[in-house]
Image (cartoon, grey):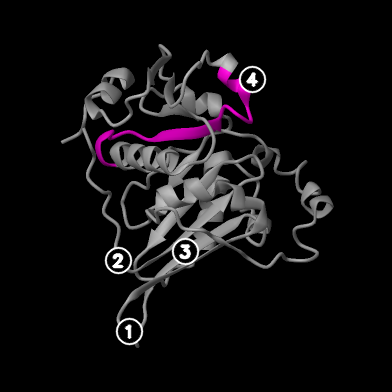
């Protein structure tokens, strides 16, 4: 079963903010007028219970994409750039922003702000940012209930709430098929799950130890870590019915 494309406006600006630990929060702004970097930092503060918004991440861990209309040709053009620290997440960025196999440009490095030693000075105050909570959060301030869960002090608190799904997608390397699977899963879950979820993508070629821990022997494999019991589906990730059966959930209408 194939899934319909997740609706995205033709013209929009997308902004993604990563943490050093690999968590992601992003937004899509059709009006291109929001001060979204401030909103993303404020949301991270609330979600991870930080002492203050982590504005120091912005010059080092952000990616932006802009779909704009060329006034001369009336063609939609795309500009996408990411700071070097997050270029490794291009497949994930293309999935959440629906940009296919777009190659992202490297944004100019901010001398003096993104030095490893400089960033390390924040670690004792913001230790949560260096932890991996498997978070992929779509922030939509136009909704009464933004698409992220209530404030948490640790991921265990999130996992105590049955309505939050923690998923892991195991793949073998980077390919067009991997991007397609990832995008289809995000579209399906955003549209039909009806509950908050996090999904971490794990490459078994670079992290074989994680595959062994989760007893994954083939790819692609989608593992539901929470709510228990742990379940997995191997191979056929286009079958929405099987995916929701594995999740123990029903599609929202």
Whichever of callouts 3 and 2 sits on the residue coming sooner in the sequence is 2
| Label 4 vs label 1, nearer the camera | 1
| Label 4 vs label 2, nearer the camera | 4
Q: What element carries label 3?
A: strand
Q: Is residue 85 above or below residue 232?
A: below
Q: Residues within 10 Å of mark 4 (few under 14, many from 20)?
A: few
Q: From this viewpoint, which residue is outermost toward the right?
A: 117
Q: From which residue to which does the magenta span run? A: 191-211
Q: Quickly name the residue at label 3.
A: 65
| Label 1 vs label 3, nearer the camera | 1
Whichever of callouts 2 and 1 sits on the residue coming sooner in the sequence is 2
Q: Position of residue 111 (x, y in %)?
A: 78, 66
Q: Quickly name the residue at label 1.
A: 73
Quadrant containing the C terminus is top left
Front residue of 4/163: it is 4
Mark 4–mark 1 Cα distance, whole angstroms, equals 51 Å
Q: How crowded is mark 3: few (under 14 residues within 10 Å), some or many (20 or more)?
A: many
Q: Position of residue 75 (x, y in %)?
A: 32, 77
Whichever of callouts 4 and 2 sits on the residue coming sooner in the sequence is 2
Whichever of callouts 3 and 4 sits on the residue coming sooner in the sequence is 3
Mark 4–mark 2 Cα distance, whole angstroms, equals 41 Å
Name the disc covering residue 209, or none. Answer: 4
Q: Quickly name the residue at label 2.
A: 10
Which residue shows up at 49% across the image and 47% down it?
A: 91
Front residue of 120/142: it is 120
Q: Position of residue 18 (x, y in %)?
A: 58, 49
Q: Residues within 10 Å of mark 2 (few under 14, many from 20)?
A: few
Whether residue 79 sits left or right of residue 88 in the image: it is left
Whichever of callouts 1 and 3 sits on the residue coming sooner in the sequence is 3
| Label 2 vs label 1, nearer the camera | 1
Q: Is mark 2 on a helix, strand or loop?
A: loop
């Amino acid at each position: 079963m194939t899934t319909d494309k997740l609706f995205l406006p033709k013209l929009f600006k997308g902004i993604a903010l990563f943490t050093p630990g690999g968590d992601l929060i992003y937004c899509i702004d059709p009006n291109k007028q929001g001060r979204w970097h401030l909103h993303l930092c404020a949301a991270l503060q609330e979600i991870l219970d930080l002492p203050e918004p982590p504005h120091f991440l912005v010059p080092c861990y952000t990616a932006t994409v802009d779909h704009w209309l060329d006034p001369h040709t009336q063609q939609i053009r795309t500009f996408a750039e990411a700071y070097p620290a997050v270029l490794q997440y291009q497949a994930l960025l293309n999935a959440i922003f629906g940009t296919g196999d777009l190659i992202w440009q490297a944004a100019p490095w901010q001398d003096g702000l993104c030095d490893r030693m400089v960033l390390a000075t924040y670690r004792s105050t913001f230790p949560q940012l260096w932890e991996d909570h498997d978070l992929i959060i779509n922030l939509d301030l136009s909704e009464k209930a933004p698409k992220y869960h209530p404030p948490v002090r640790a991921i265990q608190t999130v996992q105590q709430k049955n309505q939050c799904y923690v998923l892991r997608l195991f793949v073998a390397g980077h390919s067009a098929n991997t991007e397609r699977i990832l995008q289809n899963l995000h579209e399906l879950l955003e549209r039909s799950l009806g509950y908050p979820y996090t999904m971490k993508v794990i490459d078994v070629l670079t992290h074989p130890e994680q595959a062994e821990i989760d007893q994954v022997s083939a790819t692609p494999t989608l593992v539901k870590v929470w709510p228990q019991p742990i379940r997995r589906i191997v191979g056929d990730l286009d079958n929405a019915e099987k995916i929701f059966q594995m999740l123990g959930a029903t599609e929202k209408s």
